[in-house]
Image (cartoon, grey):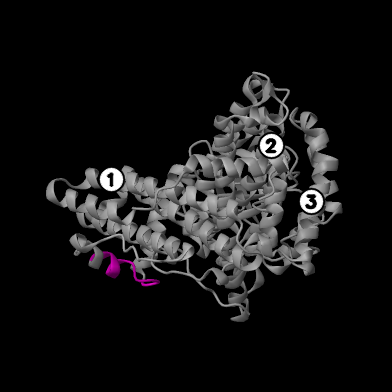
Amino acid sequence: METVKMKSGEFLVKDIDAKEIFIPEEFNEEQRMIAQTCRDFMDAEVFPNLDKIDKGDRELMKGILHKAAELGMLGIAVPEEYNGFGQDFVTQMLVAETTGAGYSFSVAYMCHCGIGTMPILYYGNNEQRLRYVSRLATGELIGSYCLTEPGAGSDANSGKTNARLSEDGKHYILNGQKMWITNGGFADTQVVFAKIDNDRILSAFIVESNWPGVVIGPDEHKMGIKGSSTTQIYYNDVKVPVENMLGARGEGFRIALSILHMGRMKLGANVIGAAKQTITDAVRYANERKQFGVLISTFGAIKHKLAQMVIKAYAQESAIYRVSKDVDNLINQYKSEGCDHGRAGIDGISHYAVEDAILKVWGSEMLDFVVDEGVQIHGGMGYSAEMNIDRGYRDSRINRIFEGTNEINRLLVVESATKRAMKGEYDLFGPAKELYENLDNITDGQVAGESYFDQKKRYMKNFKKAIMIMIHATMEKLGKKYMAEQEVVNNLANMIMELYMVESMALRIEKLESINGTRDVYRDMLNVFTYDTAYLIRKNARDAIYSITEGKEADALIKAIKNLTHVEGVNTMAARRRIADRLIEDNEYKF
């Protein structure tokens, strides 16, 4: 069994050897076959029906999900004893990436396989798993997840939906309202969150949609993901058998938070598939469209856009599979210690709360950037509903709201990382204090004759030092209420996110070279991304410094951060052109 190389958030203070991470180039034959099955399914059943799907035909979407079930796609994450395939977390993420190109179908599919099924697998007892999970895995049932209410969005625990025990003690009587329920119009099962009596904390229940008192509203009219059935659901004295409580009384809030961690991670994989599809659509259009007598793919401005789209997608992919293998290793460790399969799975995913939030925020904003540039490359046709880029642009926007808004998740990045350090899971504050007390002695640490990857490792260490200094300075100046100053916390979160992404890319490319030898186009990507990251870390640090201090102390901090974010200059124009030329030659995303 592989050991856990790094705890959640520990990347802030610990270096890791490239050979110890997982990269997509290491997918085994079975994983590649599963991904190809998913691609073939998308080509046959989803892409030809995109216009019909977007008209909101509930039966069509349910029918496509049933066809996916026939191929086993609904049971990828479900153990064999419950009619699934029991694939590891890396494979689950590969499937999430592959199906991420499916627009509204992707939303319905991921809802069913993720938040519609996994709460019962992770927190249900064996009877509940046999009754529901085994049928969700085969498509006999389609699942949904009912948490949000009109007055309870980001503050999920403030929901008003209520459950009270019946006089005979056999049922909970459920009353309330839920909104923004994905698959709501055709789902057979619902994981519903409600407070029992006057409880302060939520409990969770498995509800069947055809039970008396369950009223399904019409589909909402939305900006994007128009083919995804999104409804309100009302509960009017619904009798829920006591044996359908999921987990223990009052455990609902924990279940909700844990499932959101999973959803964030899988969304982070989903957006990669959507980004790759958009990049392919954009370069193919650029290779066909002529202006001023030449293909627009020959224009420097277009090459800049294409290259930047590739760099960001590649970074997200590098980070996703790096942490996915960490999750697998931790799940296996929990199992070896005697933990139940379900709890081992969700505890393994939830442990990586810092990375979950990073990948959700950075990935959703990466896709928004990619589709926006995709529209621009298409020009006027990008604004036409005739092109898929129109659908991709509108569908992308929900990802910054899904699974907790990006504003909430930015706060979680910092809060989770610092709380783990406070619990002693890794030493952040000791080194941070030492750096802060020796600001005048900080240099960029440049060494004569260092190798290419040694230089990049030095940059990463310096970025980490810059972040540690800023965390200490923020907590020193703002005290225990530092989380209340959200603008400064956002600066810290941005620094942490950029570090994780660039380090993940650097580790991937170093390992890739050890397998396949040097390929300059990947170094071009890393050079540009590192150069840009240094600027972003420096900019966010400066903004935070001037928000919390001034005078000589601010000057000392600024000088230290400048030294720690100093990187070698890069001819970004030439590097981006080489990246774009590779994409243009391939005529699709093949990185």
Give whichever of discs 1 and 2 has the lower sequence position: 2
Residue type marked 3: Cys
Q: Which residue is mark 2?
A: 215
Number of numbered discs on residues: 3
Left or right: 207 as drawn, with respect to 506: right
Q: Which residue is mark 3?
A: 38
Alpha carbons under labels 3 and 1: distance apart:
46 Å
Q: Which mark is residue 425?
A: none
* Magenta region includes residue 425: yes
- Residue 181, given in percent of the width and then of the height, sits at 63, 40
Q: Name the front one of labels 3 and 1.
A: 1
Residue drawn 70% across the image and 25% down it: 289
- Residue 507, given in percent of the width and then of the height, sits at 53, 63
Is the residue marked by circle 2 packed among few (<14), some (14-19), or many (20+) residues within 10 Å? Answer: some
Residue type marked 2: Val
Magenta segment boundaries in residue numbering: 424-433
Look at the numbered disc 1 and give the secondary structure of its residue: helix
Q: Tell me whether the residue at label 3 lies in contact with that at label 1, contact meaning CB atoms closer than 8 angstroms.
A: no
> In the image shown, does 403 or 269 lie closer to the viewer?
269
Q: Is residue 344 above or below residue 538?
A: below
